[in-house]
Image (spheres, helix red, strand yellow):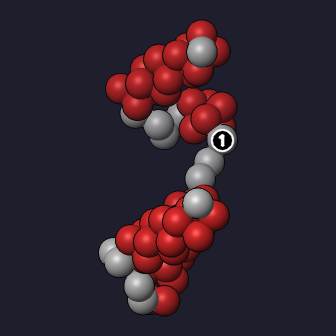
Amino acid sequence: MKQLSQIYLVLLLLTGLQGCTTIGYYGQAVGGHMSLMMRGQPVRSVVADPQTAPALKQKLAVAVAARNFA
């Protein structure tokens, strides 16, 4: 029974690696995530900025309300 579970584990791991086998894939994913994180701005500062469009301010207010509700 233990050997069968080990076989299933190896098959599961191999199946998970089939779609993302290159290092380039992971590098691109991490790089993209980091660029998004570095460009992020606090919602309060975007809402307080007079250059921010009123429609965007309204959408951010709804997002903040939803977040507070959750």
Residue 67, how many percent across, how many down?
58, 21
Along the horizontal axis of the image, is 51 left or right of 40?
left
Residue reaching furthest to the bottom: 23
Residue 46, how many percent across, how many down?
57, 38
Which image quarter holds the N terminus? bottom right
Question: Badge 1 is on which residue?
Answer: 42
- Residue at the image position 48 percent from the left and 89 percent from the top: 23
- Residue at the image position 49 percent from the left and 79 percent from the top: 26
Say which of 1 and 28 sits in front: 1
- Residue at the image position 60 percent from the left and 10 percent from the top: 69
Residue 41, how many percent across, how many down?
62, 48
Residue 70 seen by the camera = yes
Residue reaching furthest to the front: 1
The answer to whether residue 68 is above or below residue 47 is above
Residue 48: image quadrant is: top right
Which image quarter holds the C terminus? top right
The amino acid type found where label 1 is placed reads Pro
Mark 1: give few (<14), some (14-19) or many (20+) Cα within 10 Å. few
Say which of 30 and 37 sits in front: 30
Residue 43, how many percent across, how many down?
61, 35
The answer to whether residue 62 is above or below residue 11 is above
The answer to whether residue 3 is above or below residue 55 is below
Say which of 24 and 61 sits in front: 24
The answer to whether residue 41 is above or below residue 5 is above
Residue reaching furthest to the top: 69
